[in-house]
Image: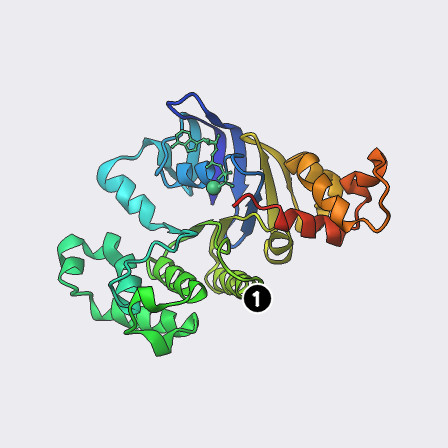
Amino acid sequence: MLTLSGVCKRYPTGDRALSDIELSLPRGQITALIGPSGAGKSTLIRCINRLVEPTSGSIRLDDTELTRLSGRELRRARRAMAMIFQEYALVDRLSVMENVLSGRLGHVGFWRSFLRRYPAKDVTEAFRLLERVGLSHALDKRADALSGGQRQRVGIARALVQSPQLLLIDEPTASLDPKTSRQIMRLIRELCAERRLAAIINIHDVALARQFADRVVGLRAGRIVFDGKPDELSAEILTTIYGEEDWDTQADHERDAPSKSKTQSHPALMSPISALAALSTGSTR
Ligand SMILES: Nc1ncnc2c1ncn2[C@@H]1O[C@H](COP(=O)(O)OP(=O)(O)OP(=O)(O)O)[C@@H](O)[C@H]1O
Ligand SMILES: [Mg+2]
């Protein structure tokens, strides 16, 4: 459904954020994109919806070459790709319902949404989605009166009211507690299954990626260094993606014995659980 081929991005500052990315996503698949800070995860998902212009390469959504589109055609293609941000990006002074309906902006046009005259079917769908994400009791609440988890649920409902084929999700759980994070990931997973949506989720929490994604892609310094199933994520592969130094320090806490020998601190010798715990707490944010 989505195919990236030879995608490169060099920022005007000279930073080479992506090199020769080859990636193909089928409908309905949830892909977790993991990698250290600065690896290019956000750049990659932003290139897909052209919030960032790739320097070269091809990005196809079904039969449409996204890199060649502009103006109206680009706007139309963007409707098929809904983005969910870490910062939730809600309008604080608007109600939950209005925030969700703003997801229809690309469909109903500026004036209609400015005047808050959404078609009845959009309002019905927004109700249905808010019920689905567990917020039917909070329709009239202002967005700034919600908790982080609730705000993320609004962000998800707003993305889905757009009727996308693809979800681009940047660190959906970065500011959430562990339980809420799992609930949000489970919700995303269920909604993708119900609607056969493909999703790319940038995530620092490797344990969540393992549990909720169908596929994991590891980026390091702008290159894909791993592409496989979550249960293939061995400590060795995690080292390839993240490097050793970040978690050697953590390994010091994890070890029972105080020995400092090089082999003992190697992540491959940590139990998978402690390796993952080390990584998930090693988030740079
Ligand atoms: N607007 C920009 N201008 C110049 N360089 C940028 C810009 N945005 C990102 N970069 C650079 O591109 C590289 C990749 O950044 P990106 O934000 O995609 O990484 P990331 O994997 O999302 O990191 P994080 O996990 O911290 O969010 C970094 O070297 C970064 O400094
Ligand atoms: Mg990022």
Camera-nearest residue between 218 and 167: 218
Residue 204 horizontal/vertical position (percent): 57, 47
Q: Residues within 10 Å of mark 1 (few under 14, many from 20)?
A: few
Which residue corresponds to the image point at 30% horizontal and 72% vertical from the top-left? 141
Q: Secondary structure at mark 1?
A: helix
Instruction: Looking at the picture, tell me which residue is in the foreground, 21 or 280.
Output: 280
Q: Is residue 255 left or right of residue 176?
A: right
Q: Is mark 1 within 8 Å of ligand 1?
A: no
- Residue 234 can be seen in this image: no
At label 1, the amino acid type is Lys
Residue 165 in sight from this viewpoint: yes
Please state the horizontal and vertical placement of residue 214, each as a whole percent of the image.
60, 53
Above or below, 203 against 93 in this view is above
Q: Quadrant of residue 211?
A: bottom right
Which residue occupies 66% across, 38% down? 246
For the rendered model, the colour scheme is rainbow
**Residue furthest top as drawn:** 14
Residue 149 position, x and y percent, is: 45, 64
As displayed, is residue 188 above or below residue 255? below
Front position in the image: 220 or 148: 148
The residue under label 1 is 179
How many dots with numbers? 1
- The spot of residue 61 in percent (x, y) is 41, 42
Q: Residue furthest bottom?
A: 137
Rendered position, 161 above or below 199: below
Residue at 49% of width from left, 31% of height from top? 5
Indicate left or right for 135 with 118 as reference.
Answer: right
